[in-house]
Amino acid sequence: MLAGKPKILLVDDETLYIDILVDLLKNDYTTVVAKSGVQALERVADDPLPDMILLDILMPGMDGYEVCRRLKENPRSSGIPVIFLTIKSEVSDEITGFELGAVDYIAKPMSPPIVRARVKSHLALHRAQQQLANQNLALEQRIRERTEEISRTKDVAIFCLASLAETRDSETGKHILRTQNYIRVLAEHLKDHPRFCDYLQCDDTIEMLVKTSPLHDIGKVGVPDRILLKPGKLDADEWTLMKQHAEFGHNALLRAEQELGSTDFLQMAREIAYTHHERWDGSGYPQGLKGDAIPVSGRLMAVADVYDALINKRVYKDAYSHEEAVEIVRESAGSHLDPDMVDAFLQLRDEFLRIASLYRDSG
């Protein structure tokens, strides 16, 4: 084959028409001949694929319609443009050919100028379609890469922002990683639960829960150090100020929505910041929500936050063992925490321990 010459497969059981087509096209194209439907499929199996197929319909054995059907069913050959050549000139015949995927229909006896013109036009159209498809693939790849870059940048910004808030507290960036992973395994476990499947059935929702959870305590930036770092029990006034961090976080994220436009991400982050200290029995803060009135996101965060607070040392308490923390969480079912989420936690206790060990605080 000469470099740059398109390859055309000519399929016809009549030597006369094959000779005419070869003579007509040989100067501009590389021609390959098949004299039956079976032979045509064998030729297509060879490399390189033909750029176009001129296909007779009325052939003994396998007719052109069946050849075309098989070509279009095979992903390797489905994109090759097929032009039917036939003495069948009824409209119904043409419709059948187009329905099978042919791009054109040339009646016999053939007009050489028409054959050349249509071959040239359909090859040009096919090349343009391939170029467009390649450009679309390249564009999709660039968009995908850019989207991933933006997502990574957002994740880094969230992590840094949350970490800065926690540097003023006794918690660390490892707390963020632990609670993110607790929430992921808990949500994945509960996504088929009848009470939670509507909310958690979408993987995007679970991913957003994981990505927004680091902002749960962002409101602590508004709490004075004398309270955050107090190495003992807070008095009533101090506790009142400490509890305001849920509102501080909610309000800061609400202002971001008002200034930058509301998004599902900001809404969920605000929801988690505002509700993760609510309690199942209604004794939590800041709104005193009860039971299912507490958003699922806040309830998930509560389980993750309670367990992690228990197993890690704080300025006001020593760390509990994993076993002690599990028992405290178990006893919190129906009072502090959603009972079904506690059941899920108990089934996942070993996974929670694995995550806690993997992201253990240093020192």
Image (tube, grey):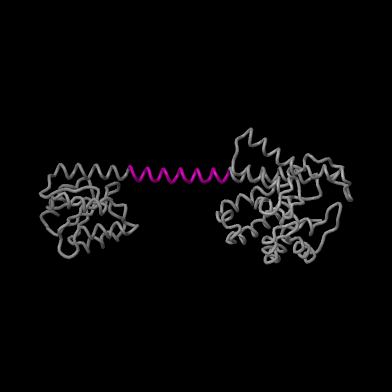
- The quarter holding residue 305 reads bottom right
Q: Is residue 94 magenta?
A: no
Counting from the top left corner in percent of width and height, residue 357 is at 74, 62
Counting from the top left corner in percent of width and height, residue 323 is at 78, 66
Position of residue 102 relative to residue 132, above or below, is below
Counting from the top left corner in percent of width and height, residue 88 is at 13, 53
> In screen coordinates, is 296 left or right of 92?
right
Name the foreground residue: 163 vs 27: 163
> In screen coordinates, is 81 left or right of 197?
left
> In screen coordinates, is 293 left or right of 73?
right
> In screen coordinates, is 117 left or right of 207?
left
The residue shown at (12%, 58%) is 14
Counting from the top left corner in percent of width and height, residue 72 is at 29, 56
The residue shown at (71%, 38%) is 251
Name the foreground residue: 196 vs 158: 196
The residue shown at (12%, 57%) is 15
Name the foreground residue: 6 vs 170: 170
The rendered magenta stretch, by its main secondary structure, is classed as helix
> Magenta segment, which residues?
128-149
Kindly give the residue lying farthest to the top in the view shown.
Answer: 259
The residue shown at (25%, 57%) is 68
Position of residue 353 relative to residue 131, above or below, is below
- The quarter holding residue 327 reads bottom right
Look at the image and tell me in which quarter the C terminus lies.
bottom right
Number of marks drawn: 0
